[in-house]
Amino acid sequence: KWPKQVMIKEVGPRDGLQNEKTAIPTEDKIAWINQLSQTGLTYIEITSFVHPKWVPQLADALEVATRIERAPGVTYAALVPNQKGLEKALAAEVDEVAVFMSASETHNRKNINKSIEETFPVLEEVVKTAKQEGKTVRGYVSTAFGCPYEGNVAIEQVIRVSERLFAMGIDELSLGDTIGVATPKQVLELLEAVLQRFPKEKLAMHFHDTRGTALANILVSLEMGITTFDSSLGGLGGCPYAPGASGNVATDDLVYMLHGMGIATGIDVERLTAAALFIRDTIGRPLSSRYLQTVAR
Ligand code: HMG
Ligand code: MG
């Protein structure tokens, strides 16, 4: 019923830090990513090459991406919204780029200043160029379970955007519950529709834990055959253009659950915890992870 192994994609340095109020020194970001590289994680989304006015927290993207120590066996990815972002990502020699758009019109406009229809040709060019440069490409569909402006999002709308992204040649699709509204029933219904069209090996789930349903949603996804999940250490994060959105499911909580179920992740819990304590102390506030609260240090 459950897989033997799960791939965890750490998005904390990007999705987590993009929404932090406190300014985090570049040196600390680099030190943290270097620690993450030694935990057994094999995929880290390290930053995004978006407009610094839109996401000031990640204005040091180029510096972070070029100064971290790359560990063998770890894929270092960055989010890019357009050709300009891609050029920077290529200059920084990231291994993989991630493009993103929303299933709902209003969030897409608020987040990237374009309609859904206007976004397709922009991403098409990004994916094409990235592929020519030998990069793998991940595609995110945001607001796949609900939009902060429009409420419910139709499954057909998620399928439509996903089909367009796969047609562009993306290697993997990550379905985002941007504002953490999904429940297991909704996950089941969306995945039933999605899995009829796309292979489960090419799908990842990206749950924010705003309402405490993320682990339940992951359990249902596991039972539907999904084996790749995005998470942020400590539960950091949110989308700056989704009001009220809080952090991703915490990597440490997810690892606790999976290991307890006998599902391997390749992650060393001691090292992961040390990295969580490091970023907690850097940010200077308690993080939302439950696991971390059991670690008295
Ligand atoms: P725009 O203003 O429409 O851009 O912003 P533009 O193409 O009209 O260009 C305006 C100016 O920006 C120009 O400069 C461009 O060169 C510059 P000027 O000529 O005026 O001096 N520019 C850039 N500068 C740096 N980097 C770039 C770039 N592109 C253009 N890449 C844009 C459009 C997409 C750039 C903007 O809306 C933006 O940066 N948005 C990013 C929003 C964002 O990062 N949101 C959070 C990430 S998504 C998320 O969190 C969801 C996810 O986690 C999944 C989930 O949870 O569902 C992935
Ligand atoms: Mg997100």
Image: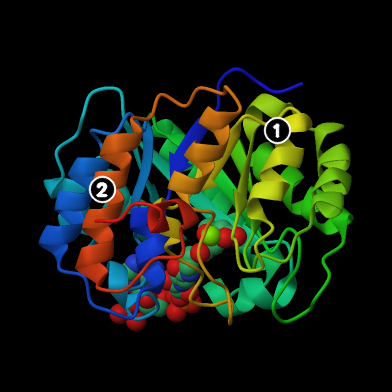
Using the numbered discs, state the Cα–Cα distance from disc 2 to disc 1 in whole angstroms: 26 Å
The percent coordinates of residue 207 (x first, y second) are 61, 54
**Residue under pointer 2:** 275
- Ligand 1 within 8 angstroms of badge 1 C-beta: no
- Left or right of 257 on screen, residue 293: left
Specify the quadrant that holds the C terminus. bottom left
- Left or right of 17 on screen, residue 200: right
The percent coordinates of residue 68 (x first, y second) are 16, 45
How crowded pointer 1 is (Cα within 10 Å; few <14, some 14-19, many 20+) is rated as some
Q: Residue at x 81, y 41 (%)?
A: 191
Q: Residue at x 54, y 72 (%)?
A: 112
The answer to which quarter of the image holds residue 136 is: top left
How crowded pointer 2 is (Cα within 10 Å; few <14, some 14-19, many 20+) is rated as many
The percent coordinates of residue 181 (x first, y second) are 72, 66
Specify the quadrant that holds the N terminus. top right
- Left or right of 183 on screen, residue 236: left
Q: How many marks?
A: 2
At label 2, the amino acid type is Ala
**Residue under pointer 1:** 222
Element under disc 1:
helix
Front one among 17 and 153: 17
At label 1, the amino acid type is Leu
